[in-house]
Amino acid sequence: MIRLKLFLPLFFLCSCFLPAQTVTSFEGIDASQVASPKQTIDPNGAVGTKQYMEWVNGYYQAFNKTTLVKVWTKPQAISALAWGASAPHCSSIGVDTVILFDRLASRWVIAGHSPEINRHYYSCVAVSNTDDLAATNFTWYTYQFDLTTCIGANSSGKLYYPDYTKLSTWVDGYYGSIDQEDPDKSYQEVGIVAFVLDRTNMLSHSTPNPVQCFSNTNSNGSVYLAHSLEPADIDGTTAPPQGRDEFFVSIQNPPNDGHSTTSNTINLWDFHVDWINPSNSTFRQSTLPVPTYTPGCYNTANVAYTFCVPEPSFNSFGVHYHIDSVGDRIMWRLAYRNFGSYESFLGSRTVLVGTGPPKDKQTGISWFELRGSGVPTVFQTGVVSPDQSLYRFMPSMAQDQVGNAAVGYSTSSGTTHPGIKVSWFSLSNPVPTELGMQSGTADEKDFQGWGDYTSMTVDPVDGCTFWYVNEYFTTAQVSALTWRTRIANFKLPTCK
């Protein structure tokens, strides 16, 4: 079916009376466009030199940055990508896959993991040979890496399930993270794995060195409170300083003691890789103090149950349908930019902001900036929550080449259907300005999951234009899947 491209111009004025600016948004991949849509779609994408590329679980599509014309007539199934003999176990990847644009090499990267195959799990990565997805000589270099030893097994010998896998670009490797989930404990998170792949040889289509990895697992099988590591991903075309280690961040949830609801720290993880002598590679955790927070939708009886965001529709019990805030983790991405005089890492997560009765679970967006030439420290933090009614959740954040930050997120409430908004501010004066990106007109009624992450990225050519993707509904999802995705781009007037 041929779909009409929609353009939605939005205008707003900054509080400092800068000229009006236009936000362009258009339709991304929708459930009706793919043969086997998934219920949880994990929308994400990246902007490259010539195209924007989007992912929903199982499928990808790309759009010309200028004309917004689709690169392929329909979304491409990840199973149809020519994985070939170099990655024979990767034809069925589909969930927790991310799209990257390696800005230092001008290459596209698709990364996910295989299902369990003969008691093995594999990291599956496809790297493009060019920055132009529409080029006549375009092809993918494909790789698989056995993660089984990295992932480990529980006391009964069952492999942990590798959930919430992420991958990012650094100079000396593609760095990834995995949540270890115990199948004997209803897939409870019991630890993490951090790994690195040999980016240098992957880019040259040479045989890469074996994966290097570290794990941190609760030996008693209790719930792991520092899960879902986010590896730093480079924005811009200025590389980190020579020899710079890769850093990850993760949340530190409140103690699982049945009554604690707040935390005042996050975790920093320093991964140093030595490809010549892997025994010299290290992975170290430290703690960063932040203002006291309560993770979004935090439930002392079940710390992994984060389904408190209401929708307007009511179920058969007369209660609002609720969706997942994913408030128990830091969200994709940890965006890194090297300004020369300093290095900046930006991250965001969903926190409790409600000030009403105990049942008021309103969520907002908490963000942080790390700086430092050695081990980075917290430079500043903030919260985006401009009202006392709308729930804001599922954020993703980045900054342009002059230090303007933008964070996109989902919104919903008991009177407002799930939609998409964006806030922006200068990091030198972090007062957010919020603008609407897409209003939803219907609810998700058949499932409480709501994606698992979104992505905000910045154009590597002009260093200024933000691109963001997220999901919404125009028709209630009851039995048939009706989700839609929207992609937007905008440039702040102070970025030249």
Image (cartoon, rainbow, N blue to C red):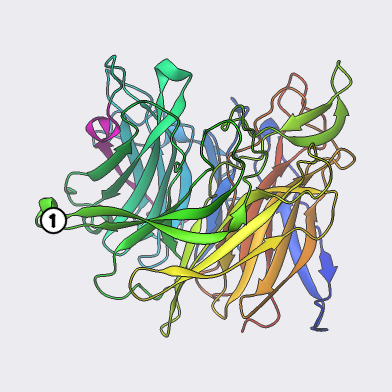
Residue 71 drawn at (x, y percent): 56, 50
Residue 224 is drawn in which quadrant?
top left
| Mark 1 crowdedness (10 Å alpha carbons): few <14, some 14-19, many ≥20 | few
Residue 394 drawn at (x, y percent): 64, 47
* Horizontal side of residue 260 vs 102, given as left or right: right
Q: Is residue 215 shown above or below 66?
A: above
Q: Quadrant of the C terminus?
A: bottom right
Work out whether residue 355 or residue 320 is closer to the camera in this orientation and state it.
355
Q: How many marks?
A: 1
Q: Residue at x 74, y 51 (%)?
A: 353
Residue 281 is drawn in which quadrant?
bottom left
* Horizontal side of residue 204 vs 304, given as left or right: left
> Mark 1 — residue?
280
The amino acid sitting under disc 1 is Asn
Residue 493 drawn at (x, y percent): 71, 80
Residue 389 drawn at (x, y percent): 85, 49
Residue 185: tell me if it is visible.
Answer: yes
